[in-house]
Image (cartoon, rainbow, N blue to C red):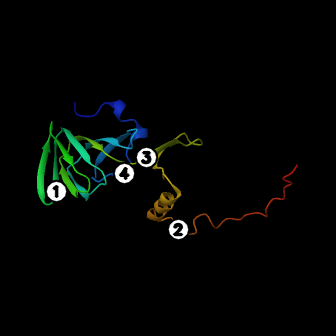
Amino acid sequence: MDDFPEFMKHPVNRIAKTDQATPGVEGYVFDGADGSQMAFWSCRETAVSAAQAHEYDEYMSVVQGCYTLIIEGERIPVKAGEEYLIPRGVLHGGEVVAGTRTIHAFGGHRADRMSVRLDPATGDVILSRRPDSWESFFKLTEQAGVPDGFMSDHQDGAPQKRDLLR
């Protein structure tokens, strides 16, 4: 096999690009009842993964290709059929060869899904990251560069008078 089966790649499980540490990857996430997650990544191009550390353990298994972990300057090639446990708090990055597929298990929440919805007017499928709180919503609008006065230049009519007890 050169790719994960289609049933593992349902759009509602696709990882948002903002949660990808490696450019050119496509990932899907599944949640455990205890807050843990499993993720499946396919790397379409040779790339470098940004260094990161988690508050939970990370287990990885390479299904196809090679992922070279970089931990404290040490290069650790993890090839197809091999696995590696990255303890919580350990800063790690890496390099991935095009065509590599990996499976990761995280002892906590690692990735957010893209929000998938259907535009009722056009029928278009819209993929976007759904904020999980108002705080993250405002952070996303800030990151996206939404101007402070966005939508404030509109003409409101006079407030409606209503008899609320009728």
Percent from the top left, x then y, of residue 129?
A: 45, 50
Q: What element carries label 2?
A: loop
Residue 35 vertical position relative to residue 90 in the rendered view, above or below: above
Viewer-side label of 2, 1: 1
Distance from Cα at disc 1 to Cα at disc 4: 24 Å
Viewer-side label of 1, 4: 1
What residue lies at 11% left-to-right and 54% top-to-bottom? 75
Viewer-side label of 1, 3: 1
Q: Are marks 3 and 4 in contact (CB under 8 Å)?
A: yes
Residue receiving disc 4: 17
The front one of 62 and 55 is 55
Q: Is residue 123 visible?
A: yes
Residue that extends furthest to the bottom in the rendered view of this protein? 148
The front one of 150 and 32 is 32
Distance from Cα at disc 2 to Cα at disc 1: 40 Å
Q: Is mark 3 on a helix, strand or loop?
A: strand
Q: Quadrant of the N terminus?
A: top left
The front one of 139 and 74 is 74
Lower position in the chain sequence, tag 2 or tag 1: 1
Percent from the top left, x then y, of residue 128?
A: 46, 49
Percent from the top left, x then y, of residue 100?
A: 20, 42
Residue receiving disc 1: 71
Residue receiving disc 2: 147
Amino acid type of disc 1?
Ile
With 64 as the anchor, is 137 left or right in this view? right
Percent from the top left, x then y, of residue 25?
A: 29, 47
Amino acid type of disc 4?
Lys
